[in-house]
Image: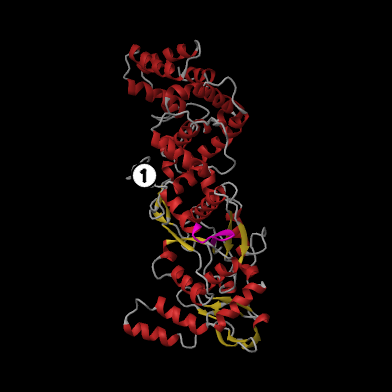
Amino acid sequence: MSSEEPQEEEFSIHWIRDVVNRVLERDVDTYIISSGKSPSGSIHIGIVRELIICDVIKRELKRMGKKARTVFVVDDFDPLRSLPPSTSLPLETWIGVPYSDIPDEFGCCDSFGDHWANELIETFPAFGVDPDIVWAHKLYETPEMIDVVRTCLRETKTIRKIMVEFVAGDFEEEQSEEYTTSMKDWYPASVVCPECGRLQSGVKGQISPNRITGYNPKTDIVTFECKACGTSGEFPLTEVRVKLVWRVDWPAKWYVLGVTCEPAGKDHAVKGGSYDTGLEVSRRVFKWPGPVKVAYEWVRIGGRDMSTSEGIVFTPRSWMEIAPPELYRYLMLKTDLSRAINIQPDRIPELIDEYERFERVYYGIEDATDDKRELARLLYPLCVTGPLRKEYIPKLSFRFAVMTSQTVDLLGMPAVVSRCEHVLKKQYGLEVVPPEAKALIQARLNMARNWALEFGSESDRIEITDRVPKEVIESLTADDRRFLSAMLSVLEGDELDDETLQSQVFEQARKAGLKEKRAFAVMYRVLTSRKYGPRLGSFLNLLGYDWVAERIRSVL
């Protein structure tokens, strides 16, 4: 969502019903909704939009009494083309080797591909998705997939025609003729070289696959030549590791897994692109319609397209450190699939406020129009990541948590949590804070602190020194000191609520002959060495009267 767009009037959830209706037309025993990703490094949070689309389709089908499950394909049989900045593996050693065959230099997983896939998979429960995991390198070892590879090799002429139709369709005449000529001896699969372990040689822009150069359907023998080390020969199909080219690999996996529906980003779903090629392969080679195509726009972060290969990555784990996963689901689900979503991390507090107002509308504890109540009834259950609770769990304001979390080092976690419980009691009229609400406090404090330190503005960040700096003390005028003395008297009296204490700052400034702006700046400089800060009444109550009084005495 960009800053120029209205926030609460852009809901467009009819896409959910439209997609589910299209999927239902397939009328199968079990609906399989699939997604997938190549683990070339840290996988950015954009893929979670796809996973959430799959999850919502599954939830809605199950709600209708249908059998449905989701599948996530880890494309770890893809060859390495480049390395992410976070790894120190030598590129020249592993270029062209399948991700599943490259060691995990961090030592925690079975392979390079395993490492980066698991970084994503470990976040699935938090985001409320639970697909079955399919590892591509293992899928290619199954008799079903080997048989599909055999079918593709037998149907190479048909696949060549499809590739010419879809790839060369928009070429100029000369370029189209060159491509068509190059396809005459082309086969839709490559071999992992049994000598050097590579599927291809060269880096991006100069890639040469170890393409199969011949196939005898009677003997099931393939011939190939390794572009990396020069190895060549004839091998039974079952004795070499073969991988189909991308535009054929995708529909082959659809066919083997029985995929009913798969969402895809705009790069793949563009008319005549890899998705449409796959659907044509499905119809003409595998004799079935292929899955329901669901195209969606990308998720952007701070106005930038994310790219693992280019190192522009904001991971699901990064999101979990600064915001609740339910908010991400909400942002994905309320926006039509045809619209890009631009998430600006600096606006997280505002977005959390919006989502939690929406949540309170669902539970009937915040006023709303009939339309918004109906919207909440439909959408909120799809936003939650676990079981839908019957009662609302009171939550600490994220904005308050931003301020409060930064005083933990000064006051200690028990004192800060106690203050947070006091605020919850007052805000929701509670005698006792429920255990579920208590459990959320520390997690919210950690999240808010992480956000403030990484994405907050200077005014969001609070730093309290052990002592008031000498230059602050020396800058105080006689009027400043009169005002501070008056505030000291207020703090030595009865405890006041936030608003009354805020009013006292105005009143004591007026009595001391001090302009209000100057009075607030004096208090902030004594407390934080800055001229500004969080709302002062609540900040003073948070810090505690004893601590603030001692701070003021130290400068008088």
Where is residue 169, by image quadrant? bottom left
Q: How many marks?
A: 1
Residue appearing at x 42%, y 26% in the figure: 535
Q: Position of residue 200 (x, y in %)?
A: 55, 78
Q: Is residue 412 left or right of residue 176?
A: right
Reading the image, the residue beneath label 1 is 10
Q: Is residue 546 left or right of residue 350?
A: right
Instruction: Report the coloring of the rendering.
Output: secondary structure
Q: Position of residue 357 (x, y in %)?
A: 44, 34
Q: Nearer the viewer, residue 269 or 398?
A: 269
Q: Nearer the viewer, residue 59 or 296?
A: 59
Residue appearing at x 52%, y 50% in the figure: 56
In the figure, 138 relative to 223: above or below?
A: above
Q: What residue type is disc 1 on?
A: Glu
Residue 198 visible in the snapshot: no
Q: Is residue 249 magenta?
A: no
Residue 379 visible in the snapshot: yes
In the figure, 375 relative to 172: above or below?
A: above
Q: Nearer the viewer, residue 232 or 164?
A: 164
Q: Position of residue 86 (x, y in %)?
A: 55, 59
* Magenta stretch bounds: 24-36
Placement of the C terminus among the 4 image quadrants = top left
Q: Position of residue 353 (x, y in %)?
A: 44, 35
Determine whether the residue tagged by mark 1 lies in a helix, strand or loop: loop
Residue appearing at x 41%, y 76% in the figure: 166
In the figure, 8 relative to 392: above or below?
A: below
